[in-house]
Image (cartoon, rainbow, N blue to C red):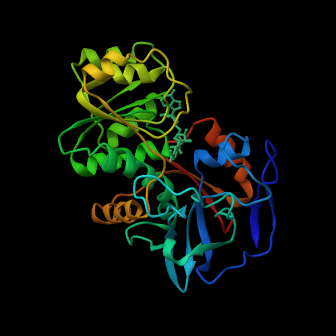
Amino acid sequence: MKALEFIGINQPLVYKELDKPIVNDDQVLVKNTFAALNRRDYWITKGLYPGVIYPTVLGSCGCGQFNDTSYIYNPNIHWGSNPTVPSKDYIILGLEEKGTMAEYTAVRKSSLFVKPKHLSDEQGAALPLAGLTAYRAIISNCKLKPNEKVLITGIGGGVALMAMQFALALGAEVYVTSSCSEKIEKAIQLGATLGVNYKDKDWDKQLKKEGIRFDVIIDSAGGEGFAKLVGLANRGGRIGLYGGTAGNWNDVSPQLVFFKQLHIFGSTMGNDSEFESMVKMVTTHKINPIVDRTFPLSKGNEAITYMKQSHQFGKIILDIEK
Ligand SMILES: NC(=O)c1ccc[n+]([C@@H]2O[C@H](COP(=O)([O-])OP(=O)(O)OC[C@H]3O[C@@H](n4cnc5c(N)ncnc54)[C@H](OP(=O)(O)O)[C@@H]3O)[C@@H](O)[C@H]2O)c1
């Protein structure tokens, strides 16, 4: 089968012929149509992810065919019995177990979910990891309610956009930040109320000037901007954090955190039942994950470079059949 093989840290992925995966009794061999990139794939290629091994096939998200039915796959493997935290054996599809950047993937039968009918295969591939992460952060942890004000940072990101779509489906009022005014404009077209550019030094003051305080804030950047998020949170506000793209927090005021009775929820992925609930929510509200651009599988390295440069508004997809 055609596949993109990860052969070592800081080395390009190699487009080549590999043997089809061998399936065990719990698995089926799914023929992928599309795979989606996640920032995790980029971190792995740079050796910036725990437990990097190679050679292997990356890709945690995919859509494909088995027995004439289109499926998407829950990327969780061995979450375990505690709904709050994964077991010690927890892994994500696409590292220790070969992933979706290939014609075929061995997927556990329990991980197969029939693709919601309103989604194309590309949109189906875009959903799993981003949808699950956004669902836990904004729905399970922050418990966003209708009419609440929510700020979502870095709206060009795949998870951030899914969080925005969940928030809009719930009837919340969505505000965004981005490094790019066109992305803010696109978010407003999708239903956001207002956005500011986080490259502006005073971006938080621009929001404060409008008199806005946020009941919920969803962030994957951390870094210097996090102290500003604490300042923008409403009393009793909930902050959902699932990434640290911009590095460590600086100058976060403990007084603001405790005087305002803030809740800060860190999360990674989500449990299997949250995956099921997320797919139900996407189906009920006919949510279409935003696909930014599709590259042929053979151009996987170009796709990763494009992700590194953060040009995207939504998910970057690989077309397996090209
Ligand atoms: N914990 C988990 O389970 C989990 C799951 C998925 C992702 N993550 C992490 O979450 C982060 C985003 O992942 P993703 O897959 O959504 O990545 P992505 O699609 O590549 O999006 C990255 C986005 O981050 C935004 N960004 C970059 N620097 C920023 C800053 N200083 N302040 C605010 N936003 C900034 C940019 O938004 P603009 O383009 O709008 O400027 C960029 O488009 C990554 O660090 C990833 O490792 C964690």
Q: Nearer the viewer, residue 157 or 193?
A: 157
Who's the residue at 74% across and 59% down the image?
A: 298
Q: Nearer the viewer, residue 278 or 158?
A: 278
Who's the residue at 21% across and 19% down the image?
A: 211
Left or right, residue 54 beside residue 29: right
Q: Find residue 48 and report its horizontal and vertical position in percent.
A: 68, 39
Q: Look at the picture and state if 113 lies above or below 138.
A: below
Based on the displayed image, in which of its 4 quarters is residue 29 positioned?
A: bottom right
Who's the residue at 59% across and 44% down the image?
A: 39
Who's the residue at 75% across and 76% down the image?
A: 20
Quadrant, the N terminus: bottom right
Q: Look at the picture and state if 194 lies above or below 275.
A: above
Q: Nearer the viewer, residue 37 or 141?
A: 141
Q: Find residue 126 and report its horizontal and vertical position in percent.
A: 50, 57
Left or right, residue 87 beside residue 40: left
Q: Find residue 182 and report its horizontal and vertical position in percent.
A: 45, 32
Q: Find residue 311 and report its horizontal and vertical position in percent.
A: 57, 37
User: Which residue of the protein is positioned furthest toward the left in this rendering?
Assistant: 147
Based on the displayed image, in which of its 4 quarters is residue 196 positioned?
A: top left
